Amino acid sequence: MTTSRAVTAFPQLPSLVVLVVAALCFSCGDQTDHGSLVPDRVNAVRGLTVPSDAKVLSNSGPTLGRYSATAKWEYETGSAKDVYLSWLNQQLERDSFALKSSDELNLVFTKNSQDESESVIVKIAPSNQKLHVEIAFTIDSD
């Protein structure tokens, strides 16, 4: 009897329950789709930052957190520092990244879009006629 009274007193209750359940299911689907796009995004940024002559030393990630994803890669290139930095800047600018900060051997590029911010942190070190490069890429959901 209590259930029938609740339904009589709140005739919209069954519809409301269906809407809440549907909204929860749709939000779960969005998270899954977002998570499945992260590896593609990491690969796209990796492709922008690794020159064709590079010898890849390591790749890790993406590692997914609750509101973020990170990936790192490391390589050596035969390019001179100035040539590499110019090339890297052009590559990342094409993908709407902006140089946020830099010094001689460290650069930070950022990009904000929709509900996310992305950062590319670049550390370079000249080594035996080569340039040693470490990159950390992060996606943060706002």
Image (tube, grey):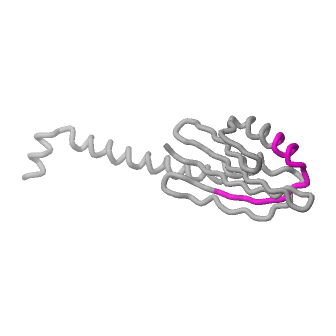
Question: Which residue is at 61% across, 56% downward?
Answer: 70
Residue 2 in the image, given as x and y percentages of width and height: 8, 52
Residue 9's quadrant in the figure?
A: top left
Residue 126's quadrant in the figure?
A: bottom right
Residue 113 in the image, given as x and y percentages of width and height: 58, 36
- Up-down relation of residue 66 to residue 7 (above or below): below
Which residues are the magenta region?
71-87
Residue 47 in the image, given as x and y percentages of width and height: 77, 49
Residue situated furthest front in the rendering? 104
Q: Is residue 77 magenta?
A: yes
| Depth check, front residue: 52 or 6 | 52
Q: How many marks?
A: 0
| Depth check, front residue: 17 or 8 | 17
Question: Which residue is at 65% across, 57% downward?
Answer: 71
Q: Is residue 68 magenta?
A: no
| Depth check, front residue: 100 or 41 | 100
| Depth check, front residue: 138 or 36 | 138
Residue 106 in the image, given as x and y percentages of width and height: 72, 49
Question: Which residue is at 11% across, 41% downward?
Answer: 8
Question: Which residue is at 49% across, 43% downward?
Answer: 142
Side (left or right) of 91 relative to 9: right
